Amino acid sequence: MLKLGCHRTVAPAAPSAPRLEDKLSDAGLNARIERLAWSARVPLQCSLATRFRRGRLFLAGDAAHNYSPATGQGMNAGIQDAVNLGWKLSFAANCSGGEAAGGLGAEVLLDSYDTERRPAAHRRLVLTHTAFWAEASTGRIPSWLRAVAADGASVALVARRNGAPPVSPQYTASRTPLPPARNALTTRPRVKP
């Protein structure tokens, strides 16, 4: 497996309530934990197999790639792998003489699983790693991004709770509406009697 920027953290014990309160305080939140029912450290594992096929062995889902839980991509990726591989295996098994459509061999079709799904898995790994970095990193840039995003989101939420429309009335009133679109499909030709 190829590791891309993620690592495993092994912790001796789960964080306690005072330790979690310290973390909240460090984040600028004045919160108190009254009761902690359960606490655990979850190791982050991000990996991507160097190939998804070797002979008659295929890797799909978590066997082929692991992502950060950020953006919730794990199960969807596994389902997409299964759909892509499933129809190819079925087609290859049912084609006569090992020849797939257009004279291409079944092996070529099955090889396309790796060339299609591995790049998609790599893009998803980069996406989830970036999202996790933005959500959880304590560095200056992600902290600033979270502060800006949280500030904008809280302003929008307060405005919505107070009954404000999603777009300011000043913006919509200052814009001139466009005339209806006219093209060959929406305009009827004028016929003179």
Image (spheres, rainbow, N blue to C red):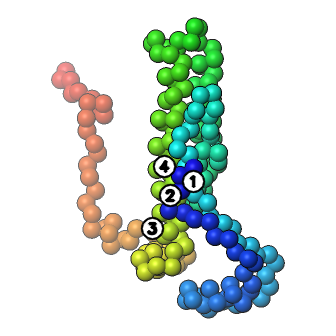
Label 3 is placed on what type of residue? Pro
Do the CB atoms of the residues marked 3 and 2 lie less than 8 Å apart? no
- Label 2: few (<14), some (14–19) or many (≥20) C-alpha neighbours in 10 Å: some
Query: Which residue carries the number 4 mark?
Result: 122
- Give x and y (percent) for residue 12: 73, 77
Label 1 is placed on what type of residue? Ser
Cα distance, mark 1 to mark 2?
6 Å
Cα distance, mark 3 to mark 1?
40 Å
- Give x and y (percent) for residue 52: 56, 38
Do the CB atoms of the residues marked 2 and 4 lie less than 8 Å apart? no
Cα distance, mark 2 to mark 4?
9 Å
Do the CB atoms of the residues marked 1 and 2 lie less than 8 Å apart? yes
Name which residue lies at 62% across and 85% down: 23
Query: Which residue carries the number 3 mark?
Result: 166
Name the side, left or right, on which 9 lies relative to 187: right
**Mark nearer the N terminus (3 vs 4):** 4
The image's mark for residue 67 is: none
**Element marked by disc 3:** loop
**Mark nearer the N terminus (3 vs 2):** 2
Name the side, left or right, on which 17 lies relative to 139: right
Name which residue lies at 63% across and 14% down: 94
Query: Which residue carries the number 1 mark?
Result: 47
Query: Which residue carries the number 2 mark?
Result: 4
Name the side, left or right, on which 37 lies relative to 114: right
Name which residue lies at 57% across and 34% down: 53
